[in-house]
Amino acid sequence: MQKEIVVSGIRSTGFLHLGNYFGAIHNYLKMQEDYNCYFFVADFHSLTTHPDPKDLKQSVFRVAAENIASGLDPEKVALYAQTDVPEIPELYLLMNMLAYKGELEKVPTFKDKVRLSPDNVNAGLLTYPVLMAADILIHRAVKVPVGKDQEQHLEMARNFANRFNTRYNIDLFPEPHVFRFDNNTVKIMSLDGNGKMSKSENQNATIYLNDEDEVIRKKIMKAKTDSGPAEPNAEMPDYIQNLFDLMKLVAPADTYEHFKSSYDSCNIRYGDFKKQLAEDMVNFVAPIRTRAQDLQKDEAQLQRILKLGAEKARASAAKTLSEARKAIGINYY
Ligand code: TRP
């Protein structure tokens, strides 16, 4: 049986952190075994904010390296840079003819951007969902592992797919749907208890995959705690729960059980707890960081990997694009 097709884009802005790891990458690792996966660095998308040309390559390579260091296998999946697949912008152009200004202006992420940077409301920003639809539809993917904040974009991708199929009376694009591997994916909160870990904000309360050991220790030791539970088996405030969640993810089960029962019996000393968590966190992050650093030093290797990914992606993309062109009537020769 043919494997189902999965597509996901990774933003190339900012450093990957634990929230990305346990939210997205962790799921990619499971998916790469069972699905036909296309994972790409969304570098076209990053151009909406005009990154410094000097930095672009490095951020793309860093994201690729961090994903590979986390366990993504470029032999199993197609891992590529979006800008290496020219079929994507062509499909984006074709899809733009079916996207209406009104529906694009209504998208909440667009409205947020307009509010946050009113001086840079460019057409690329407005048509961001069209490009994202092209990313997905170019491989005729049916499953898209993304967070809640992307659901509206996915709904638009379904609309564009159906609109194309209806207009050209063809069954070319299947509907893509949000895909969660398991529903108990933990949300990793910021260590100061304010919101989620972030690629750009709260840097002292976010653990990045490239943080050095000492930085990790410092951040964990500074994590928000309080004077401890007031009664046995008390419910945990969310910032304490978050530290326990992290421990569960990175520490051996008996370590977690030990501190959980000391919490439940009101004997917990948060200093000791955080010290242990810091050590387990260092043991978890350090190998990923080292692998990613080694890979980033080996530019030729990363280039080989991305080229291989682009070849796989283009093979699939070219088929879809040629059918789309034909459906529209672009077949002159
Ligand atoms: N918009 C996504 C994000 O901000 C990134 C993305 C771009 C994407 N194209 C995609 C995700 C296609 C899934 C499929 O995280």
Image: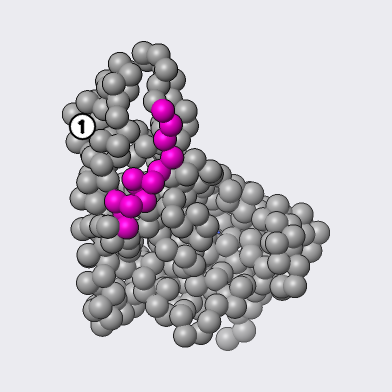
Residue 218 magenta-drawn?
Answer: yes
Q: Is the CB of mark 1 within 8 Å of ligand 1?
A: no
Residue plotted at (71% across, 67% down): 117
Q: Farthest top residue?
A: 232
Q: Nearer the viewer, residue 277 or 73?
A: 277
Residue plotted at (64% across, 61% down): 129
Residue plotted at (45% across, 35% down): 239
Residue 161 figure quarter: bottom right
The three-letter amino acid code for the residue at tag 1 is Thr
| Residue 67 rendering spot, x and y as whole percentages | 33, 61
Q: Quadrant of the C terminus?
A: bottom right
Residue plotted at (44% across, 20% down): 235
Q: Nearer the viewer, residue 287 or 183?
A: 287
Q: Is any part of residue 119 visible from this angle?
A: yes
Q: Which residue is mark 1?
A: 255
Give the number of marks: 1
User: In screen coordinates, is 46 left or right of 5?
Assistant: right
Residue 127 magenta-drawn?
Answer: no
Q: Nearer the viewer, residue 4 or 184?
A: 184
Determine whether 167 is above or below 145 in the image: below
Query: Which element carries disc 1, helix, strand or loop?
Result: helix
Q: Nearer the viewer, residue 276 or 40?
A: 276
Q: Is any part of residue 98 visible from this angle?
A: no
Start-end of magenta stretch: 215-227
Number of residues whose C-alpha sits closer than 10 Å to that of mark 1, classed few (under 14), some (14–19) or many (20 or more)? some
